[in-house]
Image (tube, helix red, strand yellow):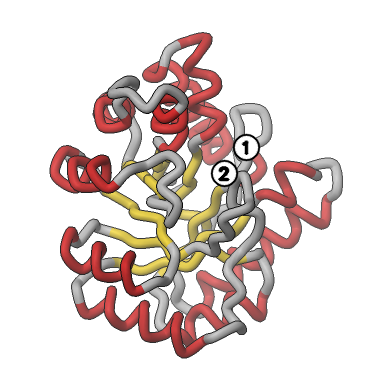
Amino acid sequence: MKHQRLYINIDHIATVRQARRGASPDPVEGAIACERAGADGITAHLREDRRHIQDDDVERLATAITTVFNLEMACTDEMLALAERLRPHQVTLVPERREEVTTEGGLDVSHDPARIADGLARLNAAGIRTSLFIAPDLHAVDRSLALGAAAIELHTGPYAHGASDPATLRALRDASRHGASIGLAVHAGHGLTVENVQPVAAIPEIEELNIGHSVVSRAIFIGLADAVRELRAAMDAARAFS
């Protein structure tokens, strides 16, 4: 089966740093360590409230990363202008509510579609690969294509929090198959761990997984490089035996 890319989200390295408002741990240093350990790319979410990743981090990541930089952001004029200037390889548009602890659901692609379509058009015109973080819903998949996205990232949170319910994995499989059939690149992420990643990694249409919190958490005990390698091995095993 085709190699499945692993992008490591380094947001929560910045979360630890921001607890003291100091200089360490440096998420850019962490990104480089992840690349050396086998990550195919690095993801970072610049939130409007700057709760973890800061503007300076994004500026440095854009030049320091040697693999692929996937910038997650809200579809706002401020963020779009930043992306147009820095031109990361990929931008994933995500929903954002200041009161949430983490991203709680997929982007509502039926709400204010003109704004989303305009944002995607601006990013596409800048030569940036575009992705929408959406629920594993067939209507959302179709709308993503109509709005102009090149890729979708399926929200795996419902699966991660309810893996015992076969409907959650079935929804991911169905959305992945449908997305690929209509020409979208299919990615997935949120809440995935070494323990639960294999059924998702085994879905053949999913080209890329974005995983962060579990890697940073595991790194506390075994180190960042080994946490990346451990996850990579679980993904590869799932692809080899599916």
At x 62%, y 37%, the residue is 198
Residue 117 position within the rendered picture, expressed as x and y whole percent measured from the top left: 42, 85
Q: In this picture, is 230 found above or below 201?
A: above
Return the residue nearer the eye: 193 or 186: 193
Q: How many marks?
A: 2
The secondary structure type at the circle numbered 2 is helix
126 with respect to 171 (left or right): left
Is the Cβ of the residue at disc 1 closer than 8 Å to that at disc 2? yes
In the rendered image, which residue does mark 1 sit on? 198
The amino acid type of the residue labelled 1 equals Gln
Q: In this picture, is 10 found above or below 132?
A: above
Instruction: Return the residue found at the far top.
Output: 221
At x 31%, y 26%, the residue is 30
Q: Label 1, label 2: how many angstroms apart (C-alpha)?
A: 5 Å
Question: Is residue 37 in sight in this rendering?
Answer: no
Instruction: Return the residue found at the far front.
Output: 21
Instruction: Return the residue found at the far right.
Output: 165
- Which numbered tag is attached to residue 201? 2
Residue 128 position within the rendered picture, expressed as x and y whole percent measured from the top left: 25, 67
Return the residue nearer the eye: 212 or 75: 75
231 with respect to 172 (left or right): left
